[in-house]
Image (cartoon, rainbow, N blue to C red):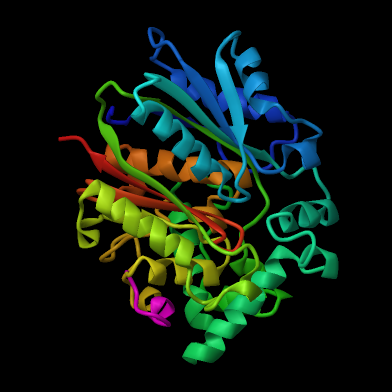
Amino acid sequence: MSKVYIKSAGLIPVGEHWNKSLTDLMVEASLNALKGQDGVKIDRIVVGNMMSGYLNNQEHLGALLASALGMKGIEALKVEAACGSGGMAVHEGYISVKSGDYENVLVVGVEKMKDADTQVLTKALAMAESADFTQVVGASFISLNALLMRMYMNKYNVQEEFLDYFPVIAHKNAVTAAHSQFKKAFTLEDVKRSPYLAEPIRLLSSAPSSDGAAALLLSSKPSDVEILASEVSTNELMISQRENPLKFEATEKAFKKAVEKAEINPSSVDFLEIHDAFPIVAALSLEAMGYSAEGRAGFDAANGKYNLDGDLPILTFGGLKARGHPVGGTGVYQIVEAYMQLTGTAGKNQVQGAKLGVTQNVGGVDTTSVVHILRKVS
């Protein structure tokens, strides 16, 4: 079986791209990733996306991108795993190269969300949950996470403000991230003054809707960054079916499998790009991976453990909350950002001496979790 390397990476700034189509976003990110790779023959294209059919009246994204790039005849496909679609696309690209059947695979994650009004977008995001049991009673995705956050606060006697340290960390890091949607820091008091969207989740603690696309060229040919492991695990679709809703079992299992495959010690990881759509997701993700004890992630964040200059930096370019969350693109943005850290091209967001990084991309409420472990090649 082949090793899998990241040959190159590209992205476009996350934001509101009113004058660009879904195709424009994919093509621009792809061309950015393919700069300087003129002699490389692409064997396969994988596109990660969740909502293009519902929001943009466009499916068949693999063939669409291949055509737009002038790669007629190439094998191309779209993969979907709710908010984990980008991570799943990278996983599909990884196993393609790992199998030895493909030498060079272009992976693109994309979502164009800002064209849709709030009601349509809310309905689209709710499709990550059960149509028969959850959507039918009008439960939105944010309300499900709010219920989970309230349950967590009650069980562990945690005040809301400790969980709200996660968006504060994210925005502090995003200030110097060129591709982030919100280059503005704010304080814990700023978060507390913002209105509730679904108590206890506030406006300033919830990831935004975003347009964006990011791309990676994966290859069996040695390069500066190797993907040591790419693992996926799933959980019951509805949190009401779970024995313990406050345990992110999909993330726990995917992370454990990835660590075993990569043959690393989790304590040797230099930074984490986690799925911080809401503060509760960040907290439960860190606890599932064992970096914080149960009920303690918010306290660790408050004590500086997860700051850019802390013991274990997270959300180094702002994460979903501040970099932005173009749903199908998020998992690919995470790995592009990890690639930047490991190649020393992260600028003012650089984690000094970074050699080993982990990304975690979630679909649904930890219904699907995709974990990647990347290392700098000496």
Residue at 76% across / 67% down in the picture? 134
Residue 110 appears anywhere in the view: yes
Q: Quadrant of the N terminus?
A: top left
Residue 122: x %, y % from top left:
78, 57
Residue 178 appears anywhere in the view: no
> Residue 235, located in which quarter of the rendered image?
bottom right
Residue 278: x %, y % from top left:
57, 66
Residue at 71% across / 71% down in the picture? 143
> Residue 304, located in which quarter of the rendered image?
bottom left
Residue 319: x %, y % from top left:
49, 54
- Left or right of 55 on screen, residue 111: left
Residue at 69% across / 79% down in the picture? 199
Name the foreground residue: 261 vs 370.
261
Name the foreground residue: 296 vs 314.
296
Magenta-span inclusion, residue 310: no
Name the foreground residue: 147 vs 188.
147
Magenta-span inclusion, residue 295: yes
- Left or right of 196 on screen, residue 44: left
Please determine whether, in this image, residue 368 is positioned above or below residue 78.
Answer: below
Q: How many marks?
A: 0
- Left or right of 255 on screen, residue 367: right
Q: Main secondary structure of the magenta part?
A: loop
Please determine whether, in this image, residue 331 is positioned above or below residue 141.
Answer: above
Q: Quadrant of the C terminus?
A: top left
Residue at 52% across / 78% down in the picture? 244
Please determine whether, in this image, residue 62 is positioned above or below residue 151.
Answer: above
Please determine whether, in this image, residue 276 is positioned above or below residue 348.
Answer: below
The range drawn in magenta is: 291-299
Residue 142: x %, y % from top left:
69, 67
